[in-house]
Amino acid sequence: MPPVPKTVLWVDDEAELLESHRLFLTEKGFAVEMASNAADALELLRRRAFDLMLLDEQMPGMRGVALVREARELVPSLPVVMVTKSEEDQTLRDALGADVTEYLVKPVNPRQVLSVVLRILEGPKIRQQAIARSFVERFRQLEQVRSRDLDWRGWIERYGELVQWDIDLAAAGEMGLYGSLRSLYPEMHRDFAAYMRGVYPDWVNDRVDGERPPLSVDVVDEFLLPVLDGEKRALYIVVDCMRLDQWRVIEPLLTPLFEIDTTYYFSLLPTATPYSRNALFSGLYPGEIAARFPDWWGEKEDETLNAHERELLEAHLKELRGNTPVRYHKISSAYDSDELERHLANAISPEGITAFVFNFVDLLTHGRSDSAILYEVARDEIALRQLTLQWFKRSALLAVLKEAHRKRIPVILTSDHGSIHCNSPATVLAKRDATPNLRFKFGEDLRAENPEQALLFTNEDDLRLPRRGTGANTLLASGDSFFVYPTKLREYQQRYRGSFLHGGVTPEEVILPLSLLTPRK
């Protein structure tokens, strides 16, 4: 059965002069109905459905803008293209105020009209088909190129490409191809864990032959200070637990305000806030923080371990460039957000560094495990991205960035670690001293029942972690695993399967965007 043609209603008091346009659209597969006045157009809209309306603004009787408003009461989602002789600014403003989809000034040729009609009615389908064709061609190559042979730059490139396909295929609704893409992830996770097991101890202990990637400890020195050296002040923004895909759906909202230059760095291990975020502020490995500032580090709760980020940043800046003014804000609740927006004009320091930590994404990720509603709303990576995007549109973070744009202040924006959607329970054998974390554990006698689900490090120095005494092992989850105990297997599976967690060794947790936002003039 041939496809049903899309229908177009064209409203113009000079309809007889548009016959060539109507015939051209008909030849291209569209069904075109003509009306010479607003009353006839409204009667047609009441009797049958149309996919698009073209109309002239200046007709006898009801003007085009008034027709748009009445037509939208009948068909709220009807796309409207205004085709008019008027070049007056007020006509354009009236049309935009009526929310017309497109605006063309006569004279127009048939191909101009066709291009607009195609873009509005067939554009999503054409883009979907183009994305599908491109992915099918690229998928064969991605299957053949093994990620086990990549260096750190290759890992950034490969992971970044898979993330973009993830976003594009989901946006195009190509869920069959999306499933094919996701089939590449288990192998990527295995190869990345093996790669990190081999290179990470050398990176953090300066045993590399050649370059290593930027790590959490390098961000202030290598990225923030060069910005501050050329400016009186700068913002340093850390969005806790923001993955690369979440950043990429947010980024387009900022391009009207900023020139955006994005690079990447590797989070410290474990990819958990006490280790990765403290390093972002201090420029120190966790073992160095514990040795240099013992009062700020101990066997305490995670939140306590991040209670001195401002002091760590001040100490780090003082060592690098002398005393530097630092203003620090941590936004962890709706009250914090409201207070920040209420006092936004004074929140940013007139000189030096103003640092912000936004915890919403991390709170969303953790809260999902404890809330049936959040679990349903953020079921997978696609839903998590959309939820993050909706938050950002109304967030104090966006308000801060708009203020930075207004005051011409450059911004370094990044994340401390990502998260991964965990579906595979990994049984852990441990003594009572083992820590309770779901993606990383410390303990004296510690191992995973299936070694492929975790990396075991028997020496804290391999990770530059604080010393915990003889026999203290570190276990880091790989892939989409989360740790369970044999005695609590069913309880942990029921509660945590499908959760977004962090602390382990996957590209989603480790490879992070770091963007320089330069305000546009």
Image (cartoon, grey):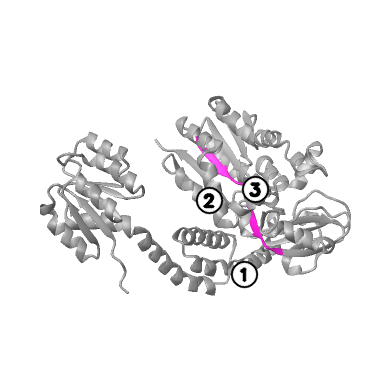
Q: Quadrant of residue 307?
A: top right
Q: Residue at x 35, y 63 (%)?
A: 126
Residue 430 coordinates in the image, percent (x, y): 85, 60
Q: Which residue is mark 2?
A: 386
Please identify the quadrant where the C terminus is shown. Answer: top left
Q: Is residue 410 left or right of residue 94?
A: right
| Segment colored magenta | 409-424
**In magenta segment, residue 209:** no
Q: Earlier in the sequence, mark 2 or mark 3?
A: 3
Q: Within 10 Å of the Cα at label 3, are there few (<14), some (14-19), or many (20+) other Cα atoms?
A: many
Q: CA distance from mark 1 to mark 2?
A: 26 Å
Please identify the quadrant where the N terminus is shown. Answer: bottom left
At label 1, the amino acid type is Glu
Badge 3 element: helix
The dot on residue 216 is 3
At label 2, the amino acid type is Gln
